[in-house]
Image (cartoon, helix red, strand yellow):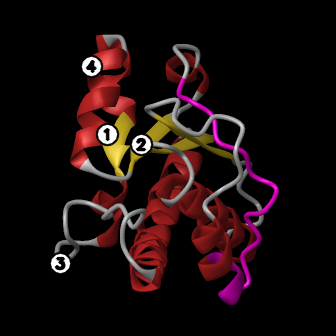
């Protein structure tokens, strides 16, 4: 199963989701064969590491993001990935606009997996303070188990 997490610039939210979900899956579903990646809908930061505040917030929770580098979503990603997960509704809409209709069902938002009480969007912490990066981690962690449950179900069915 190949999963791509997507935000706007691929330096805050989507690399956080990539790192958190990789660690969560390794810990709670080591038998699942997963490929996990992240990208941005825009090319603002291609080749750059995650924002230092992102790296720092994740490191405080034992997640290493330092080796990641930003990239932009490519047309090939719609063919390559089984599930493309946007961090918010704006990026979700952008992905739907850019993808062929036959791939629309594979494009979801992260917080769909967090349950009914979750907000619709993972807020972009880029222009805020350190608390925003911790909030992103909290939201991503809250969705990780729901996403993992769906992937287990798909694995059993497929």
* Position of 13 relative to 40 (above/below): below
Crowding at dot 1, Cα within 10 Å, few <14 / some 14-19 / many 20+, comes out as many
Label number found at residue 125 = none
State which tag comes first along the sequence, 1 or 2: 2
Distance from disc 1 to disc 2, alpha carbons, whole Å, reads: 7 Å
For the residues bearing labels 1 and 2, Cβ distance under 8 angstroms: yes
The residue carrying mark 2 is 8
Q: What secondary structure is marked by label 2?
A: loop
**Which residue is painted at 57% across and 53% down in the image?**
11
The residue carrying mark 1 is 91
The residue carrying mark 3 is 117
Distance from disc 1 to disc 3, alpha carbons, whole Å, reads: 21 Å
Residue 24 as seen in the image, left or right of residue 83: right
The spot of residue 21 in percent (x, y) is 60, 64
Q: What secondary structure is marked by label 4?
A: helix
| Magenta highlight range | 58-73
**Which tag is nearer the camera, tag 1 or tag 2?**
2
Distance from disc 4 to disc 1, alpha carbons, whole Å, reads: 10 Å
Crowding at dot 2, Cα within 10 Å, few <14 / some 14-19 / many 20+, comes out as many
Q: What secondary structure is marked by label 1?
A: helix
């Amino acid at each position: 199963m190949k999963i791509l997490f997507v935000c706007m610039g691929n330096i805050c939210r989507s690399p956080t989701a990539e790192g958190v979900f990789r660690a969560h899956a390794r810990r709670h579903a080591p038998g699942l064969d997963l490929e996990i990646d992240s990208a941005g809908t825009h090319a603002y930061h291609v080749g750059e590491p995650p924002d230092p505040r992102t790296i720092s917030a994740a490191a405080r929770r034992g997640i290493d993001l330092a080796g990641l580098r930003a990239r932009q979503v490519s047309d090939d990603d719609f063919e390559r990935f089984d599930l493309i997960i946007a961090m918010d509704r704006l990026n979700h809409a952008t992905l739907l606009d850019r993808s062929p209709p036959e791939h629309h069902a594979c494009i979801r938002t992260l917080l769909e997996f967090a349950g009914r009480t979750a907000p619709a969007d993972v807020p972009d912490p880029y222009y805020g303070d350190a608390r925003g990066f911790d909030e992103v981690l909290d939201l991503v962690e809250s969705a990780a188990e729901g996403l993992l449950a769906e992937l287990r179900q798909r694995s059993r069915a497929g």
